[in-house]
Image (cartoon, helix red, strand yellow):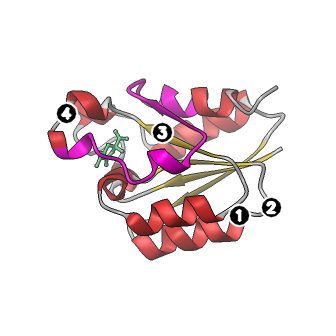
Amino acid sequence: MKLQIINGPNLNLLGKREKNIYGDQSFEDYFKKLKIKFNNLELHYFQSNIEGELIEKIQEVGFNFDGIIINAAAYTHTSVGIGDAIRSVSSPVIEVHISNTYSREEFRHKSFLSAHVKGVILGFGLKSYDLAIESFNK
Ligand code: DQA
């Protein structure tokens, strides 16, 4: 099974950025552990700070991968384009967030993705990604 993890802006700074919210682990280190834990799956990882690159990745994998796990970060709350890309592809998409966005500022309560995804997992720290992968692991 082929799964694509897509991370949006500023998530390249995990481990350095607002550690009280996002923890002290880089995504690269965490991704190594994920690959060992889920060694029966083919996991791919892409990060970009650029909205159009996120859309291009969704289009590229969205007709041939078994699933996409996306944390669009700040673009979650602004991007009609990423929402449209998700609804345009055939692969199931899971939206994840590290923090519980509903316990934070009001502008983080709106997601332009949620209506178009299979499910949303948020608030479990990096474990949100584990849980999203589990949902594909039959
Ligand atoms: C985030 C929550 C967003 O509101 C924020 O802009 C992020 C990360 C999360 O994973 O908790 O960059 O998506």
Q: Are marks 1 and 3 in contact (CB under 8 Å)?
A: no
Nearest to the observer: residue 44 or residue 28? 44
Who's the residue at 62% across and 40% down the image? 32
Q: Quick check: is 118 in the magenta stretch?
A: yes
Q: Quick check: is 31 in the magenta stretch?
A: no
Task: Kindly state the secondary structure of the residue where label 3 is placed.
Answer: strand
Q: Residue furthest front?
A: 115
Nearest to the observer: residue 39 or residue 116? 116
Amino acid on which the number 3 mark rests in the picture: Val
- In this picture, residue 97 sits left or right of residue 70: left
Which label was assigned to residue 104? 4
Label 3 CB-ligand 1 distance < 8 A: yes
Amino acid on which the number 1 mark rests in the picture: Val
Nearest to the observer: residue 8 or residue 76? 76
Q: Which residue is mark 3?
A: 96
Label 1 CB-ligand 1 distance < 8 A: no
Which label was assigned to residue 61? 1
Tell me the CA gap for discs 1 and 2: 6 Å
